[in-house]
Amino acid sequence: MRLGVLDVGSNTVHLLVVDAHAGAQPVPMASDKAVLRLMRYLTPAGEITEEGCTAVLEAVGNAAGMARRHNVDDLLPFATSALRDATNGAELLARVERETGVALQVLSGEDEARLTFLAVRRWYGWSARDILLFDIGGGSLEIAAGGNEIPTVAVSLPLGAGRSTIGFLHNDPPLPEQVTALRKHAAAVLADAVDAFAGLPTPHHVVGSSKTIRSLARLAGSTSEGFGSGERMLLGRSQLADWVPRLARIPAEARPALPGITADRTFQIVAGGIVLGAAMAAFDVAELEVSPWALREGIILRYLDHLG
């Protein structure tokens, strides 16, 4: 069957069209992305401005039209932290359904973590045993760990790359004191979260997912032989610590000239690198592997599982 997964996130509205059936790997057929950076449309009171609402409505409407043109059998639309946390999120969700016909499912942060963990587990297989997962979105950082398809512990922290950029990195490029302030803030938030993972087995694989982490790995990481004939992308904490200060000295408009840094992530890549470095330090992780599957694939897999 042909499925459309519509992800209304803090940074982008992304439609992924796949051909999929239970027991098989989903095959991507088409993809469409609108870069919104919704965090910049938030008022001090946490409300999405009318300009931001209009941008969401237009992007969702366009994505729904593309899904129809690709003859999807079912559309799986969901929203994450930007709409979940906005004070007028419920009103905007109602407008989206009324004006576009798309009823967005709002995921909790813990649901994001669990579904992303499911995708990573399926990608790596049971032989990977215990996994520790980091996933950085625009609004939140998800961390999950365990040895099964459902993680033993799953948490969501307000340390997304877009949220952290808006909250701390006010200049472009950011000032050194702004970088230091974000690093200290991230370390403090993570210190409170680490205790939830105490007592779990030492992970056999530490994995990072999300576009931000993939971008950082393409820039600063390396590859090695992976499962089957493929390669696995690796990102070391020391490599990250070397590259993030360099990125912080470069204006956002110039960063896409670097390998792996795309225009849709250029404004928040520094904050993403700072948060990831703090997370790796908090959990004493020297190196992580990068998963090509993340939340959207988790949504697809859960849907197919329920069909069975």
Image (cartoon, helix red, strand yellow):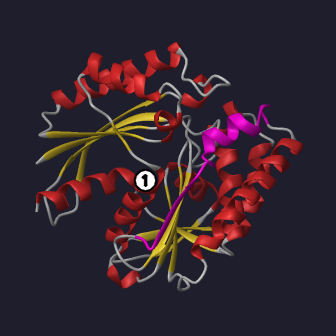
Position of residue 117 measured from the top left corner of the image (x, y, whole percent) = 41, 64
Is 297 situated left or right of 307 in this image? right
Image mark count: 1
Which residue corresponds to the image point at 61% horizontal and 54% vertical from the top-left? 216
The residue under label 1 is: 112
Relative vertical location of residue 243 with respect to residue 45 in this rendering, above or below: below
Which residue corresponds to the image point at 50% horizontal and 41% vertical from the top-left? 81
In magenta stretch: residue 79? no
Is 186 situated left or right of 289 in this image? right
Relative vertical location of residue 292 with respect to residue 160 in this rendering, above or below: below
Viewer-proximal residue, 266 or 301? 301
Quadrant for residue 17, please give it. Answer: top left
Magenta span of residues = 151-173
In magenta stretch: residue 169? yes
Which residue corresponds to the image point at 78% horizontal and 49% vertical from the top-left? 246
Q: For the residue marked with disc 1, what is the amino acid?
A: Glu
State the SS at label 1: helix
Position of residue 24 measured from the top left corner of the image (x, y, whole percent) = 17, 64
Is 50 situated left or right of 106 in this image? right
Relative vertical location of residue 302 with respect to residue 257 in this rendering, above or below: below
Is 63 situated left or right of 183 in this image? left
Which residue corresponds to the image point at 72% horizontal and 69% vertical from the top-left? 281
Q: Is residue 25 visible?
A: yes
Position of residue 145 measured from the top left corner of the image (x, y, whole percent) = 49, 72
